[in-house]
Image (cartoon, grey):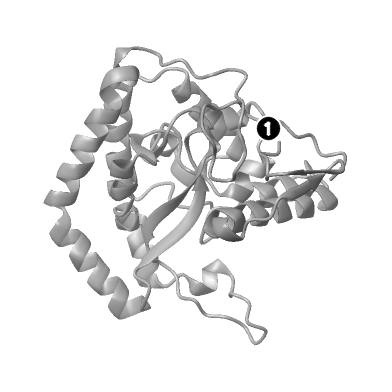
Amino acid sequence: MSKEKITILRMKEKSPLGCIREMSNEHIPYGPYEKYIKRPLDCFLATGAIVLMSPLMAGTAYLVKKKLGSPVIFIQIRPGKDEKLFKLYKFRTMTDERDAEGNLLPDEERLTPFGRALRESSLDELPELFNIIKGDMAIVGPRPQLVEDMMFMTPEQRKRHAVRQGLTGLAQSNGRNSISWEQRFQYDLRYVNHITFLEDVKILWKTVAKVLAREGISEAGRATSEDLGDYLLHQGKVDRQTYERKKELARELVRSAEKPQLRKPFQFRGKTREPETLR
């Protein structure tokens, strides 16, 4: 870890990880829509969607409970705006079946036909409407990836976290999970630098078309999308030692976010510091 390059992002407030982050290039809103209208509009639309779709959400919750058991809601730590970690809410789509040693079985074995149907219809994403109201997410924006994925992103790619992550985004309206990680990041950065009302409407329209056509749900031959670290390892773009180190760092950040009261300070160059964001 002594050779790990560490960059503290400059922020005005403390992050959930307990460190003061610094951002050398603070995001500047593209125009009045992004600066003044987008967030209030997201809250209004998300609230209305929850009210209108409450029967659908209640019915989905009942079926999840009946077919997959408890908990009905799947909660996972994800990096959001300015890389602050938040709890993402989704309807559960997998069982918690484990092997003889207590380890979870592979995704393709735990993903049931019912869970696959939820994913294909994107009904599993409906609880994220509450994330939007809370301020964790936006209706349109780069999709929130795993903390582990963030650890493998380049500094340029991590600029996608300059804005709230979205229920859908430019990458999702142009292929969803069927396109490569590099293409996803290109779409994400393109959106971050050019957020307009017309672009958001266009993305929503194309997303609805993709969902109805059930296109790009997962990569060819896979039940779920391949994690960024696994993709880079298989492509020979990261060595095994770096791969394992970054995965462990990601696990530590997630543990810190899940149980902040148990967070222990990191030891770095002989000094005690709170956990920092590592690039």
Q: Compared with residue 234, is residue 198 higher up or lower down, i.e. above or below?
A: above
List the residue tagged with mark 1: 154
Q: Secondary structure at mark 1?
A: loop
Residue at x 33% of width, y 31% of height: 203
Residue at x 24% of width, y 37% of height: 43
**Left or right: 63 in relation to 241:** left
Furthest residue in direction bottom, as rendered: 100
Question: Could you tell me residue 256's position as x and y percent?
Answer: 60, 55
**Left or right: 236 in relation to 153:** right
Question: Could you tell me residue 278's position as x and y percent?
Answer: 70, 39
Q: Compared with residue 108, is residue 53 higher up or lower down, i.e. above or below?
A: above
Quadrant of image for the N terminus: top right
Residue at x 58% of width, y 75% of height: 105
| Quadrant of the image occupied by residue 55 | bottom left
Q: Evaluate whether residue 249 shows in this view.
A: yes
**Left or right: 169 in relation to 208:** right
